[in-house]
Amino acid sequence: MKGKNIVRNFLPCLVSILLALASSILCADVSEQNLKPKLWDSYLRGVVINKLAIQGEFIWLGTNEGLMRLSINDPTGTPIKFTKSDGLLDDDIQALCADGDLLWIGLNNGVSCYDGRTFTNYSKSNGLMEGAVLAIGASKRYVWLGMDTGIARIDKATRQIANFRRYGGWTPEAGSGAVNPAAGSGKAIYCDSLLVAPDGTVWHAAFNLTHTSEDGKVLGVYHCGHGLIHSRILSMAWVGNELWVASIGGLNRFNVEKRDELKHPFDLRIGSDFHQTVPNPPMRIVADGEILWVATKRDLTRFDTKRLRWLECREASTQLGQRIITDMLPDKRYLWVATNDGLWRLDKKALENSPSELIADYEDRRLSEIFYPPILGEFKVGARKFKVSIDDADGACGTSNSLRVEWTVPEEDVAHGRTHTIAQWVEFVDATRFDGIIFFVKAKRPAVITVRIRERNGEVWNYGVGEVKAVNEWVKVVVPFEEMRLDENHVVNRVLELAQITTIEVVFTFPNAKANESLVVWLDEMRYCKLPTN
Ligand SMILES: [Ca+2]
Ligand SMILES: [Ca+2]
């Protein structure tokens, strides 16, 4: 038995040594990626979490099967679970708000308040208006509830309830294809996001943004006519005295102090599609100092509210996969992320220290990443034939997939020595902390490669990689920003602006191509990177 165990233990070792050797040959310098601190940890996989709250040493998880509590310092422990049998009004949790020692829990039939020992419930029978509590915010004096038919206020000292019934709201039937699981009944939702301002007034939304005074009077209603990109608001966050509003159309900034002087108080429009073909609305935003964490329909990303720039974190997003982010909360070290598949914890330090930032790895088949050739599949441009696919059988650096492009070259192209290009969309990343771009190519015959960077304003920069002679083998290409040369035909300001890159093109020329020959190249694992200084 013992001998068998040794063999069993020895074999995987041998395999991993061989793999290590193979990968060090294929992509020698990318081993630094393995040394990177772990970006993500995950807990309670399989659990659908709707909302998060942090209260002292606890993190609270609102699920559709009750409330869970984990130690924030040791989230691997068994969670403590609270359900109706413990005194909660309902098990399907819609909202959470940690307010000092109290935890307010929004439910389909009212609100529960947990003081560490017992639940106190407020529902129709206590005088609260009927309907679901979808958002909660606390001021010094009051707890405010966002509900389907208005907003309500509970006096924290007397526990007196005041209902402010309002008309209107948002329904899925109203169009725009918003995603709101709470809206199944077809009736309108008046308020599903709510923030209390430092002055005690309340900003709340579902359809349009409403400002309500402490005594429940409407102070203002802001809509598209005021500059709001889209009337369906999904999330809000405070950064200083600026209110940031995420709607289906993108992000709006609202300077609360200056609002009376401005005709259009929403003075920043940021499109939601990030230059992609598929709309990607920001579903949830949360402030972390001057940074906004933005969970879009497909990604996790950041926005620098001071410099008004996207700070992409594609690598983190890719590792999160197809999970849907339902809520986020930052603390000093981590970003806590609730998903439909457990609680995830992003190490912010690991993200900052990351020596590279993913541009494209083709692992998740994001068609929008590829700019040219523009579609997957076979197509013809004049006499030229293209075949673009994601190769499931091969990826650089041991990954599963890469982009494969096959050209059939007509005779006249061979005669004119035409080049072939693969272009990659780049999301608006502030790449100033990086020194260059790394990617991997493989070709069926030797190719001369040039890399071309296009800026948003149209300026073009080139870098000649030279001839890659290796055939059918992944070759690492390093493009140092320092060595990029300005294309004199496309000059704007003669400055390479690393936050303005829109596309990266890899241009192939095949010196010895024959007419009607099929030329195949693969592209993979494109990253911004830091280069070692000599
Ligand atoms: Ca790949
Ligand atoms: Ca420029």
Image (cartoon, rainbow, N blue to C red):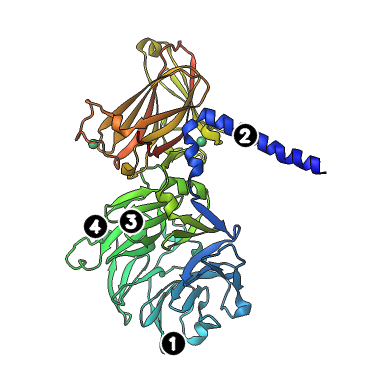
Residue bearing mark 1: 159
What kind of element bears circle 3? strand
Whole-angstrom CA distance, mark 4 to mark 3, is: 10 Å
Q: Earlier in the sequence, mark 4 or mark 2?
A: 2
Q: Which residue is drawn at 48% across and 79% down?
A: 130
Q: Residue at x 19, y 62 (%)?
A: 263
Residue bearing mark 2: 17
342 w.r.t. 408: above or below:
below
Q: Residue 267 carries which label?
A: 4
Q: Which quarter of the rendered picture does the C terminus lie within?
A: top left
132 w.r.t. 364: above or below:
below
Whole-angstrom CA distance, mark 1 to mark 4, is: 39 Å
522 w.r.t. 153: above or below:
above
What kind of element bears circle 1? loop
- Closer to us: mark 3 or mark 2? 2
Q: Earlier in the sequence, mark 3 or mark 2?
A: 2
Q: Residue at x 32, y 26 (%)?
A: 463
Outermost residue toward the bottom in this view:
158
Whole-angstrom CA distance, mark 3 to mark 2, is: 49 Å
Q: Which quarter of the rendered picture does the N terminus lie within?
A: top right
Crowding around mark 1 (Cα neighbors within 10 Å: few <14, some 14 to 19, many 20+) is: few
179 w.r.t. 111: above or below:
above
What kind of element bears circle 4? loop
Q: In this orientation, does residue 485 appear?
A: yes
Q: Which of marks 1 and 4 is nearer the N terminus?
A: 1
